Image: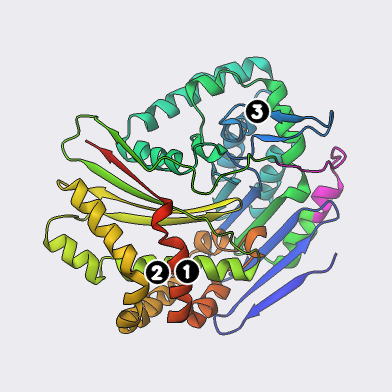
């Protein structure tokens, strides 16, 4: 397989990529002026992927909610040792996390890069699950679930998602529930591993003080020396969604000192794949910033009126199978909070032209943020892209943001600010 090189001479960086014979994609950004190296091995498998076709039987199986996160935990626990200890031996810090659609294993180090890469590849590509270890882990993860259940910010976030997606696996917490993880077995973990932890469903990203050719050769030799199970077809199964079939509002009494309010916007229009997806996502992000960032007119007005404060935040999540926006904050005026923000969304398309100067400032700000990110190994690695956006990276995003115009904002405003696809949550 040949090495692909994308040059970004204006920033002094290049992105190298090579697909190994077994399908593993390796991406490298060399930063010789840095003393650290950051690496992440990502699996295109997350919490929503618990229903799929069993390649051994041809039947659709549904594994318990939280299994992707459970699998992430168990990958470190080996026969007689913990993979974390191996990283510590070489002076590196390791971690892992699971999202709705991905699982990532990572390390950062100043020395012994290849030794740490070997550990990373080995412990992820060599599963070890026993019934005893699985049962032990249930108690540990159960405590983690309880911790999130006790956090009102976490609860209102996931409740908002449950409102928007009542019949979709997104409505389950990433870690699952106490009840769902109690059902997980070693056989379940082995099946999920067989289907999703194939080299062709993984991407290794290495950023830092490395030689790309050396990394590619090392990984190629490492993979060639291993025996992998025969590849199987990944066939995810998702329930059909009725776009506007969701819970429009929810209220809980938690005896909080101040009410918490959240507004969720369900993406209805399907996002395109490839660079077009990246542009659509960046355009929606700019739209949210234009109307709701701390420097916006809306924020200033609502802040001065005491309707929102520094706790206010918003986020946009665009991944395969779904996208949504989430706006939340603490307020003594929950109903006004909801009404005023929805009023802004209702008239947003007609207000965009009036905010041309603000839009130009936001574009410069977001471009500046990305240029600063180019000094962060972690930020570069995280933003090297995914199959969804055809691996549109941090450097590409600068050009994309530059290309976005007011007309693009108007086009996505009609989709993202669809008031027929809004849910509200109040916790007090």
**Camera-side residue: 215 or 68?**
68
Left or right of 32? Residue 411 is: left
* Residue range (magenta): 220-236
Residue 344 vertical placement versus 226 (above, below)? below
Left or right of 342? Residue 375 is: right
Please tell me whether the stretch drawn in magenta is mainly helix, strand or loop: loop
The answer to which of marks 3 and 2 sits earlier in the sequence is 3
| Residue 12 on the magenta segment | no
Element type where label 3 sits in the image: loop
Locate residue 263, reporting x and y percent.
34, 50
Residue 5 vertical placement versus 419 (above, below)? below
Element type where label 2 sits in the image: helix
**Camera-side residue: 344 or 187?**
344
Q: Give me the C-alpha separation between circle 2 and circle 1.
A: 8 Å
**Camera-side residue: 151 or 325?**
325
Q: Residue 63 carries which label?
A: 3
Tag 2 near tag 1, CB within 8 Å: yes
**Camera-side residue: 93 or 391?**
391
Is residue 311 shown to the viewer in this render?
no
| Residue 224 on the magenta segment | yes
Element type where label 1 sits in the image: helix
Q: Viewer-nearest of labels 2 and 1? A: 1
Q: Which quarter of the rendered picture does the N terminus lie within?
A: bottom right
The residue at the far left in this view is 305
- The residue under label 2 is 287
Q: Which residue is drawn at 80% across and 49% down?
A: 222
Query: Image quarter for residue 57?
Result: top right
- The residue under label 1 is 412
Locate residue 108, reporting x and y percent.
54, 52
Q: Which residue is drawn at 43% across and 52% down?
A: 421
């Amino acid at each position: 397989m040949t090495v692909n090189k994308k040059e970004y001479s204006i920033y002094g960086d290049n992105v190298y990529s090579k697909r190994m014979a077994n399908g593993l994609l390796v991406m490298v950004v060399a930063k010789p002026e840095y003393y650290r190296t950051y690496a992440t091995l990502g699996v295109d498998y997350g919490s929503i992927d618990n229903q799929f076709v069993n390649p051994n039987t041809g039947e659709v199986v549904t594994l318990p909610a939280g299994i992707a996160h459970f699998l992430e935990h168990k990958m470190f626990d080996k026969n007689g040792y913990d993979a974390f200890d191996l990283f510590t031996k070489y002076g590196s810090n390791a971690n892992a996390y699971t999202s709705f659609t991905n699982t990532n294993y990572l390390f950062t180090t100043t020395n012994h890069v290849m030794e740490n890469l070997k550990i990373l590849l080995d412990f992820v590509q060599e599963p070890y699950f026993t019934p005893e270890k699985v049962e032990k882990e249930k108690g540990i993860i159960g405590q983690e679930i309880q911790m999130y259940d006790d956090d009102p910010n976490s609860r209102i976030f996931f409740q908002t998602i449950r409102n928007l997606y009542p019949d979709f696996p997104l409505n389950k917490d990433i870690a699952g529930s106490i009840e769902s993880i109690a059902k997980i077995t070693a056989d379940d973990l082995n099946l999920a591993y067989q289907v999703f932890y194939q080299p062709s469903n993984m991407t290794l990203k290495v950023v830092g003080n490395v030689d790309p050719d050396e990394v590619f050769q090392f990984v190629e030799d490492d993979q060639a020396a291993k025996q992998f199970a025969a590849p199987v077809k990944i066939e995810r199964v998702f329930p059909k969604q009725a776009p506007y079939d969701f819970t429009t509002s929810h209220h809980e009494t938690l005896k909080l000192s101040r009410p918490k309010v959240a507004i969720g916007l369900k993406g209805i229009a399907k996002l395109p794949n490839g660079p077009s997806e990246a542009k659509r996502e960046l355009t929606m992000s700019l739209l949210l910033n234009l109307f709701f960032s701390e420097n916006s007119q809306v924020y200033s007005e609502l802040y001065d009126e005491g309707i929102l404060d520094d706790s206010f935040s918003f986020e946009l999540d665009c991944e395969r199978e779904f996208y949504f926006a989430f706006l939340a904050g603490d307020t003594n005026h929950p109903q006004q909070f909801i009404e005023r923000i929805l009023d802004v969304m209702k008239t947003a398309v007609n207000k965009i032209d009036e905010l041309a100067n603000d839009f130009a400032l936001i574009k410069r700000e977001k471009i500046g943020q990305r240029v600063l990110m180019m000094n962060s190994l972690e930020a570069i690695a995280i933003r090297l892209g995914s199959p969804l956006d055809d691996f549109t990276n941090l450097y590409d995003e600068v050009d994309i943001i530059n290309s976005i115009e007011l007309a693009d904002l108007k086009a996505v405003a009609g989709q993202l600010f669809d008031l027929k696809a809004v849910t509200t949550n109040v916790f007090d």
